[in-house]
Amino acid sequence: MILKTQNITLRPWEENDARCLYHFAKNPNVGPIAGWPPHESIEDSLNIIKTVFSKKETYAIVKDDVAIGCVGLLFHPDTNHWWGEGACELGYWIAEEYWGNSYAAEASKVLIDHAFNDLNVNVIYATYRVENTQSKRVLEKLGFEYYTDMTNENYLHEFFKEIAMKLEK
């Protein structure tokens, strides 16, 4: 499925996106704040495209034919937490070069509408690390409200605090 807005296109990830993904995802300012390690090679990025980004309802955020980020809806058992029946989890990231353009909110809004209108989703959850104020602002702009404080564990087995937000249909 391809979803379009005035500024961006959401489309499935393609294997030929690996070089572009690596270029943006190797940045240590992007992955760790979203909970994943910086990519170490084009092959690493290709593997992510074939596994993590191949899940249903996971899309490349494309601007001017360049994949600049990712947005997706995660359904159990692929979620970070169990949210209950009729629920899913929203996740997104944008390449640092494109921060400040509202692309994360724009992409997420299209996917939220799709979830509520086409996928029988009643509530969407999203989490952000307490220090990730940009993600907090994106979720607030989308109408998400505070749900709970949580503790999670990252890829280095370090514990961190995060805030869960929720948006009901």
Image (spheres, rainbow, N blue to C red):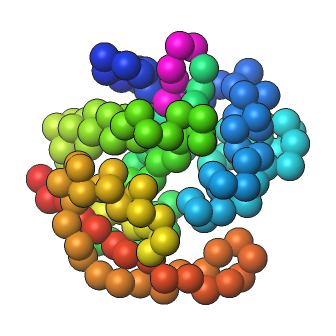
Q: Residue at x 65, y 25 (%)?
A: 14
Q: Residue furthest left?
A: 169
Q: Is residue 61 left or right of residue 158?
A: left
Q: Nearer the viewer, residue 44 or 32?
A: 32
Compared to 104, does 133 lie above or below?
Answer: below
Q: Position of residue 104 (x, y in %)?
A: 41, 41
Q: In the rendered structure, does residue 64 fall within the stretch colored magenta?
A: yes
Residue 58 visible in image: no
Q: Is residue 106 above or below residue 35?
A: above
The image position of residue 80, as x and y in percent, is: 49, 69
- Residue at 29% over, 81% down: 148
Q: Residue furthest top?
A: 64
Residue 44 horizontal side relative to residue 115, left or right: right
Range of the magenta residues?
Answer: 60-65
Left or right of 140: which side holds 68?
Answer: right
The part of the image, by quadrant, that contains residue 159 is: bottom right
Residue toward you, 101 or 147: 101
